[in-house]
Amino acid sequence: MSAVDNILDRTFGLSANGVTASSEIRAGITTFLTMAYILFVNPSMLALTGIPFDDALFATAIAAFVGCIVMGLWANLPFALAPGMGLNAYFTFTVVGTVWDQGDGMLGETVVPSGIPGVDWHMGAWEVALLAVFLEGVLFLVLSLPQVGARTAMINAIPKDLKIATGAGIGSFLAIIGLREIGVVWDDPATLVNIGP
């Protein structure tokens, strides 16, 4: 066993888990190749709301990097974390709406009072939505603290059938978005969707 293997074994307990450094490196490369698409798909989807593509790409890469580092070094678990397609589709198509849904190609501006006399924040729809996502994240962080204990109570309050149905619903939502994007289905006021031309 080389010095590098010894360091990795001491740090991550590889031999205790019955794995080797080379198998973990292969698994890491495979996992990266499996999820690398998110680096381009997520920014492309978020760009539909008006978020600059380069900014969304940078944020996606940083979020994935930090998530993976925390899971690997702090939790010592072989999980890769990155933004997911379900929530970004919900954010883009439901919370914000898209640029092409606005008719003129411009997102409306929202004026948010700052609480300071004479000072208001002028934000587009995506900026207001990102502020809401940030505040929601802070709220969930507080609820997840062991001292509060609300997270476990909320998870246990949701019936198992509803948890399973939520996954199926998100999958169907993503399928409809994909079919709409490639022109297989169109919006229809009478039936919600209709077969494309």
Image (spheres, rainbow, N blue to C red):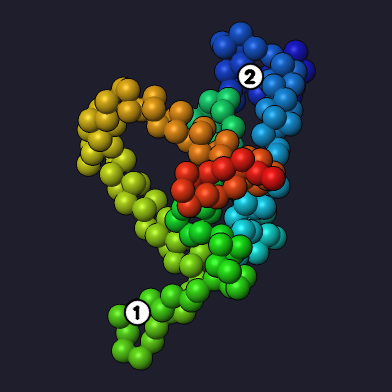
Asked if 143 appears above or below 119 in the picture, the reply is above
Query: Can the viewer see residue 85?
Result: no
As drawn, the residue found furthest toward the bottom would be 118
Distance from disc 1 to disc 2, alpha carbons, whole Å, reads 54 Å
As drawn, the residue found furthest toward the front would be 190
As drawn, the residue found furthest toward the top would be 18
Q: Residue at (70%, 38%) from the top-left corner?
A: 36
What kind of element bears circle 2? helix
Pick the front one: 179 or 111 = 179
Q: Residue at (62%, 70%) from the top-left corner?
A: 105
Indicate the quadrant containing the C terminus: top left, top right, bottom left or bottom right: top right
Q: Residue at (23%, 30%) from the top-left corner?
A: 157
Mark 1 lies on residue: 113
Mark 2 lies on residue: 9
Pick the front one: 146 or 157 = 157
57 displayed left or right of 115: right
Q: Amino acid at mark 2?
A: Asp
114 displayed left or right of 53: left
- The picture quadrant where one finds residue 144 is top left
- The picture quadrant where one finds residue 3 is top right
